[in-house]
Image: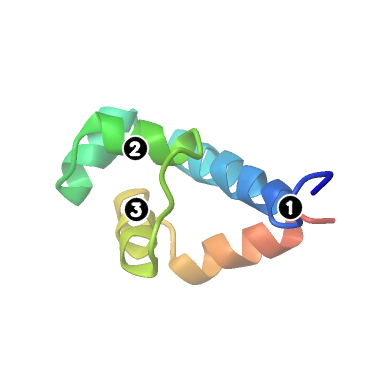
Amino acid sequence: MGGKRPWDQRRLRLQKLLRDVRLEAGLKQEEVAERIGSDQSFVSRYERGERRLDLVELEAICAACEVKLVELVRRFAASKR
């Protein structure tokens, strides 16, 4: 099996977008973690791509960063260009 999987680049874009959204909200990882009822390492792991998120977790992260889930999805779709 040579090469990368087709979704690898999309995952990297999502990791960057999640970090960007947090920073745009002026939040530290610890603050997002507190808002979603988790710990800082959880935030760090998904931002580094070591942890995948389900839709419920993604929605909670968006709420913590005060961005609508639909806006995050729109930005993700636009980032492929």
Image point 66% across, 46% down: which residue? 13
Q: Which residue is mark 1?
A: 5
Element at badge 2?
Answer: helix
Label 1, label 3: how many angstroms apart (C-alpha)?
26 Å
Image point 70% across, 64% down: which residue? 77
Question: In the rendered picture of this protein, how many numbered marks are placed on residues?
Answer: 3
Image point 30% across, 51% down: which residue? 64
Q: Name the foreground residue: 10 vs 60.
A: 10
Q: Residues within 10 Å of mark 2 (few under 14, many from 20)?
A: many
Percent x, y for residue 38?
A: 18, 43
Q: Name the foreground residue: 15 vs 3.
A: 3
Q: Name the foreground residue: 65 vs 40.
A: 40
Q: Residues within 10 Å of mark 3 (few under 14, many from 20)?
A: many
Furthest residue to the front? Answer: 1
**Disc sitting over residue 43 in the figure:** 2
Label whose residue precedes the other's in the sequence (2 or 3): 2
